[in-house]
Amino acid sequence: MTTPAPIKPELVCPAGTPAALRAAVDAGAENVYCGYQNATNARNFAGLNFTPDEMAQSIRYAHERGSKVLITLNTFPPAGKVDLWTDMADLSARLGADACIVADIAVADHIRRHHPQMRIHLSVQAAASSPEAIAWYVREFDVKRVVLPRIMTVSEIRGLVDEIPCEVETFIFGNHGLMVEGRCSLTAYVTGQSTNMDGACSPAACVAYEQQDDGSLATRLSGVMIDRFAAQETAGYPTICKGRYLAEARDGGYYAFEEPVSLNAATMLPELIRAGVHAFKIEGRQRSRAYVKKVVAAFREAVDTVMAGDEPKLADLVALTEGQKHTEGALKSKTWR
Amino acid sequence: MTTSQTDHPAADGARGPLPLLPPPPLFLLRPLLARIVRKVAARNPGMFARLGPHAGEHFLIDPVDMPFMLHLRPDPDALDFRAVGRRGAAPPHVARISGTFLNLFTLMDSEQDGDALFFSRDLVVTGDTEAVVCLRNALDDVEEPIAHTVAAMFGPPGRLALDLMRSAADTRRRREEAQP
């Protein structure tokens, strides 16, 4: 019996603007994911995202070049107020989107009933990581792909691929989110706005940077100081989970939840491909088109090289990482810290 | 909110970014900048929508190694982009964006990521963070990078200047990467 040839994974790349979408497509993305300018989108940040007209033009641009567009409807509607989410799903179907990335079962149910031709991808926000949970989503809503939380080792992913009846997508670069995804309420605790329902983790309106005379930089979220970077120290995003706090067990400021560091699974691509992963996701819809162009191009070359049976020459992406540090995270070991 | 002009690690406001090109005097810059902002706005009328309620705000862009700063009001009905001297009080502004001239140039050339510059502390943002994020997103979504548009306005000399600045930015980047 021969081992089946590995599947060539698709690159799933971020776009916060039409220019970023074009950059991703031009750099070789098979899939681009993006969202609308409202709470249906977990990157509902000021000045970002797509109007319906921009989405229509962007889908056309992608399709003309053989790429697919996946729409992020990956937040949770408040109880009884699902209309905005179903309206955006209807709009996405009219515009010819290739899939919707969904977290909430009411949204998934609406798409399944009204747009049976539309692929549903289960968002990482649904935090489904067991065979039983994923199989339930597939059975009930005909989910075609699941985006796995960033807490699983390659070995666990390999085992899961064999047990579930849908495609698997894993993050390979960008934010290193180790919270129970879709359940984190840290930002809501401080800002009153919910990552999971309003789509805004640390909204910019609540963020303030204070440059001190000694060259240090203090970061505040809704007035609460969450970190202070020394003059020569690299900085991270202004999120509660990446803040430094005084804790009894430690001397001085301590990264109690996570450190400002990015996931970079570049060295693990061969192992992930052998594990049967169908799609590799790059995080960063809030980033510039320069980021999109560089990261997508680097991973395009790396995946193609691995599939050709060669050793990939990995571009140095550390300058683009949070805190200018990167890690293979839980993919390599649960004891990564 | 305003901050002092010495709040960026590279600030001295005296050196030019390129050894061969001294900073131009303010009286020459003012009509040039007015022409540039009108051209960029005419080519990208959709960019103002991304600014939302911040289109009428005043921004201070501080190339810390130049003897002047740039004042921007990205209001489509009252565009204002001018150089201001460092002597005296800075004009009123809601936010200040500080970095070396070459770093600010690479952002306008769509070759550099603003978040990456923030992580490395090469870009300093103070004041209204949301206004800055909206401005960043608006400028990043233009059809053609702004540096290209500006270079094309001046024909072959403009394109030569663009090449020179790219070369200077590349040289500096390689030098920084070579440092341990």
Image (spheres, helix red, strand yellow):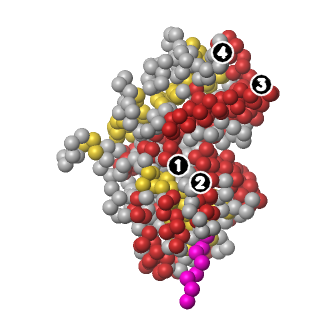
Magenta residues, dominant SS class: loop
Q: Amino acid at mark 3?
A: Pro
Disc 1 versus disc 4: distance between alpha carbons?
36 Å
* C-alpha span from label 1 to label 3: 34 Å
Residue where numbered disc 4 is placed: B24
- Image height check: is A238 above or below B79? below
**Residue corresponding to mark 1:** A317
Residue A209: image location, x then y, percent: 42, 33
Q: Would residue A246 be counted in the magenta stretch? A: no
Residue furthest to the left in view is A248
- First in sequence: mark 1 or mark 2? 2
Asked if badges 4 and 3 are on one and the same chain, I answer yes
Q: Position of residue A15 (x, y in %)?
A: 61, 52
Residue A76 visible, this angle: no
Residue type of the residue flagged with mark 1: Leu
Q: Secondary structure at mark 1?
A: loop
Q: Position of residue A37 (x, y in %)?
A: 59, 49
Q: CA distance from mark 4 to mark 3?
A: 15 Å
Q: Are marks 1 and 2 in contact (CB under 8 Å)?
A: yes
Q: Is residue A250 left or right of residue A29?
A: left
**N-term mark: 4 or 3:** 4
State which chain disc 4 sits on: B
Residue stretch rendered in magenta on the structure: A1-8
Q: Amino acid at mark 2?
A: Ala
